[in-house]
Image (cartoon, rainbow, N blue to C red):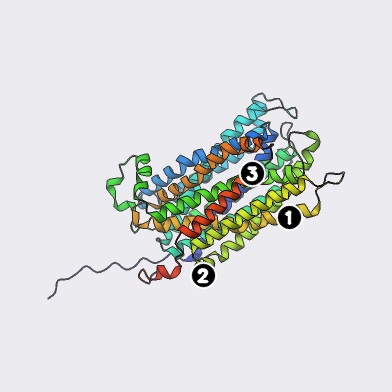
């Protein structure tokens, strides 16, 4: 008789797409707070007394924490055995990160009140050192929480899809869709100026109406965050085994974290490096917009200033209009997330990513043109900008939603699928991709303020750099990234349906 062979293990049952959808829902709660952060905090820090030239330096907290936090959290979640915790290895970090975000937004929202307790002079126009210090602590904790939540959640989705390229793209499209929903809710919240009436206790001697609106919005963020985190954590059990996973390489468990992180670079293939390069160029493009989008609307379009009492109202009107534009941006972001998989099937992910970057560059050029036109136009005596200028600005903000959806999805899906054969855990892989995001952010944070001051103090010089980086990134993506369609994954055994 022929020798008996061990029966092949039955294939693991794939996680239904509806559960992948629920697993990605925490992105809504995280992005709700991130949208508030993007639309309201740059104006807020200038109210506290930080000059516009140095406002970008405040945002160094995010990339500096991201340099270490997300790779470290990814590394730790890779090393935890799935059975070691009732929540598996990713979800404890997701829950802890969400708790950090909740504590952070309370700290940021109440920074003006805490600063007064520490002795701040609350006279308008003065620099509030105590409030700035409290704000910086809360802002740093907020970025730590964001990094500690999003990295494990991306890795969680990659675990659930078992590195199937198509399902990985779908899962990341779900994540992007929830980010769009969080953006819509967050920017709509930031555009509404009456939250202080609903939460009247938020108005205090040290916290004006605009500050109280910020504080109220962050209280709403905590509610949304708790709900979405619960849905994600309770949605689906993590798989107990991971194909090609680091759990099968016990010899690496004792390696020093930084040595493993940077030592893994030597294993990268050219396609992995191309993904990292295009990611870095893409975020050099995005970060000036993220820093100064609503500030640009308030200063360049509405000709307001948070430092000059006579121009403060116009500035805040512009910030709210910018928040409305970002809400429209998020609507298109959500729609693009829904159709993204079909676009990738038809044209290939590399081409879609490249074209989206070129569209980004054209939008940033359009913002430069709008800035020039607005600067040389005569405004009516009441200072309200012409309707055509406002509409053109809103159109540009809206169009940018399409490339933003691609930025939120395709790089992560490409990174997840390309590290499968490198012996890296998905958590560490997401952390490495994050390095390609935060290093450009450090560069932009350090350079954008002085760069803008060199050319007169506006936001236009930073947008010029953004346009150039986006265009180069688009060319690199089109020429250097493979255009493999979904058929290529079917040829790998016919299981990727």
Q: Can you say which quadrant of the picture contains the C terminus?
A: bottom left
Residue named by callout 1: 392
Q: Of the residues tagged 3 and 2, which is closer to the observer? A: 2
Measure the alpha-carbon separation of dots 3 and 2. 41 Å
Q: Which image quarter: residue 448?
A: top right
Tell me which numbered mark, 3 or 1, is placed earlier along the sequence.
Answer: 3
Residue at screen point 83% across, 44% down: 383
**Residue 339 on image: x %, y %:** 57, 66
Label at residue 128:
none
Task: Residue under label 3, please give it.
Answer: 218
Q: Which residue is mark 2?
A: 346
User: Which is more N-terminal, label 2 or label 3?
Assistant: 3
Question: Would residue 23 be visible to someone looking at this image?
Answer: no
Residue 410 or residue 153, whichever sits in front: 410
- For mark 1, does the 10 Å Cα neighbourhood hold few (<14), some (14 to 19), or many (20 or more) residues? some
Residue 9 in view of the camera: yes
Image coordinates for residue 311, horizontal then vertical, percent: 79, 38
Q: Report helix, strand or loop for mark 2.
A: helix
Foreground: 424 or 360? 360
| Contact, mark 2 vs mark 1 (Cβ under 8 Å) | no
């Amino acid at each position: 008789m022929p020798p008996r062979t061990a029966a092949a293990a039955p294939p693991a049952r794939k996680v239904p797409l509806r559960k992948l959808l629920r697993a990605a829902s925490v992105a809504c709660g995280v992005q709700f707070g991130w949208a508030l952060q993007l639309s309201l905090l740059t104006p807020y820090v200038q109210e506290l007394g930080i000059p516009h030239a140095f406002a970008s330096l405040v945002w160094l907290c995010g990339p500096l924490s991201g340099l270490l936090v997300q790779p470290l959290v990814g590394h730790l979640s890779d090393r935890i055995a799935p059975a070691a915790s009732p929540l598996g290895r990713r979800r404890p970090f997701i829950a802890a990160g969400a708790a950090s975000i909740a504590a952070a937004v309370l700290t940021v929202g109440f920074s003006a009140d805490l600063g007064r307790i520490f002795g701040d002079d609350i006279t308008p126009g003065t620099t509030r050192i105590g409030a700035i210090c409290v704000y910086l602590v809360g802002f740093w904790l907020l970025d730590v929480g964001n990094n500690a939540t999003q990295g494990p959640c991306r890795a969680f989705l990659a675990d659930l899809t078992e590195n199937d390229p198509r399902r990985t793209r779908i899962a990341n499209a779900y994540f992007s869709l929830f980010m769009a929903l969080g953006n819509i809710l967050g920017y709509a919240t930031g555009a509404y100026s009456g939250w202080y009436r609903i939460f009247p206790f938020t108005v205090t001697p040290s916290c004006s109406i605009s500050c109280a609106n910020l504080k109220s919005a962050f209280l709403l963020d905590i509610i949304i965050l708790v709900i979405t985190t619960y849905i994600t954590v309770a949605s689906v059990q993590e798989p107990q085994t991971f194909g090609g996973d680091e759990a099968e390489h016990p010899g690496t468990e004792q390696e020093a974290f930084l040595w493993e992180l940077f030592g893994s670079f030597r294993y990268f293939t050219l396609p992995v490096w191309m993904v990292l390069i295009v990611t870095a160029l893409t975020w050099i493009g995005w970060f000036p917009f993220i820093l100064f989008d609503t500030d640009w609307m308030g200063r360049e379009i509405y000709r307001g200033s948070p430092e000059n009492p006579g121009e403060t109202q116009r500035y805040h009107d512009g910030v709210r209009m910018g928040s409305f534009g970002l809400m429209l941006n998020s609507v298109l972001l959500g729609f693009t997330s829904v159709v993204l998989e079909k676009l990738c099937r038809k044209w290939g992910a590399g081409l879609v990513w490249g074209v989206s970057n070129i569209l980004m560059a054209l939008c940033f050029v359009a913002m430069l043109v709008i800035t020039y036109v607005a600067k040389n136009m005569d405004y009516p005596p009441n200072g309200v900008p012409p309707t055509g200028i406002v509409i053109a600005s809103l159109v540009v903000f809206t169009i940018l939603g399409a490339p933003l959806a691609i930025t939120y999805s395709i790089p992560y899906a490409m990174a997840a699928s390309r590290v499968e054969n490198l012996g890296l855990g998905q958590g560490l892989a997401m952390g490495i991709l994050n390095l390609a995001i935060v290093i450009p952010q450090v560069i932009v944070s350090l350079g954008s303020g002085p760069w803008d001051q060199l050319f007169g103090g506006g936001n236009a010089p930073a947008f010029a750099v953004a346009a150039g980086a986006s265009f180069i990134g688009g060319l690199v993506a089109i020429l250097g990234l493979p255009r493999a369609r979904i058929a290529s994954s079917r040829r790998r055994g016919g299981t990727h349906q």
